[in-house]
Amino acid sequence: MPGEDYENLKKYNDIYLEIIMRYKDHIEESERLNVSDLPKLVTPENATISALCDSIRASFNNYSYDRDFAKAAVSAFKYVNDKITSVSLPIQFWQSPEETLKRGAGDSFDKVVLLCSMLINLGAADAKIVVAVSGDRQRFFVCLKSDNGVAVFDIKGVMKEYQDIKSALSELNFSESDGSEAYEFNNVLYNDIL
């Protein structure tokens, strides 16, 4: 019977995918966001995000941002990388951080929105999502100011310090000279970088 269940599930998935692809243009049109809408995706005050961050804070003895944030940020980064399955959907579909947590899955963008929401909830009000685009190539990561410049949390599993955000973008092969575009946002602002 387990093989039969798998075959039935595969058939259902194939049907759902066909329906989604048939209405792809309509779905993506409904999902389109303006630049002014991007900050609304970052929801650090959401109850589900707050509960998750409270559990991270609880792992510290009397959590203090100044003393404990660096380790809490690593815990949040590890949580997103270890607990949220990376998925690639055939359509552009926005998930809230709460939906990403509920499903335990999201694409790279969903994961950086979740991480940024968590870092802000943990006390880093200056945490921002950076989106870099060059042709068909896109990269998403979270950055925040550090004593050494800018800490970059790349959802592909890398945390690294850079002198500034343009240095990080340059190392990832995004620059104004090659026509790349980049912007940053969080729950309160949106800025063009390149």
Image: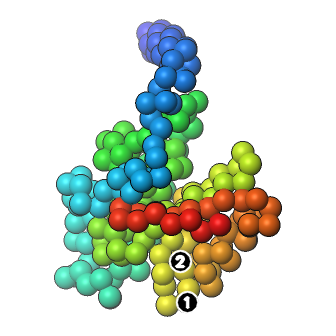
Image quadrant where residue 58 sits: bottom left
Q: Which mark is residue 54?
A: none
Dots 2 and 1: beta carbons under 8 Å? Answer: yes
The local secondary structure at tag 1 comes to loop
Question: Which x, y percent locates residue 92?
Answer: 53, 36
At x 55%, y 89%, the residue is 148
Q: Amino acid at mark 1?
A: Asn
Q: Which residue is mark 1?
A: 148
At x 35%, y 74%, the residue is 125
> How busy is the neighbourhood of tag 1: few (under 14 within 10 Å), some, or many (20 plus)?
few
Question: Which x, y percent locates residue 61?
Answer: 22, 82
Q: Which mark is residue 151?
A: 2
Instruction: Give the left or right position of residue 40, taking residue 23 as reference.
Output: left
Instruction: Give the left or right position of residue 84, taking residue 90 as reference.
Output: left
Image position of 49 with respect to 75: above or below? above
> How busy is the neighbourhood of tag 2: few (under 14 within 10 Å), some, or many (20 plus)?
many
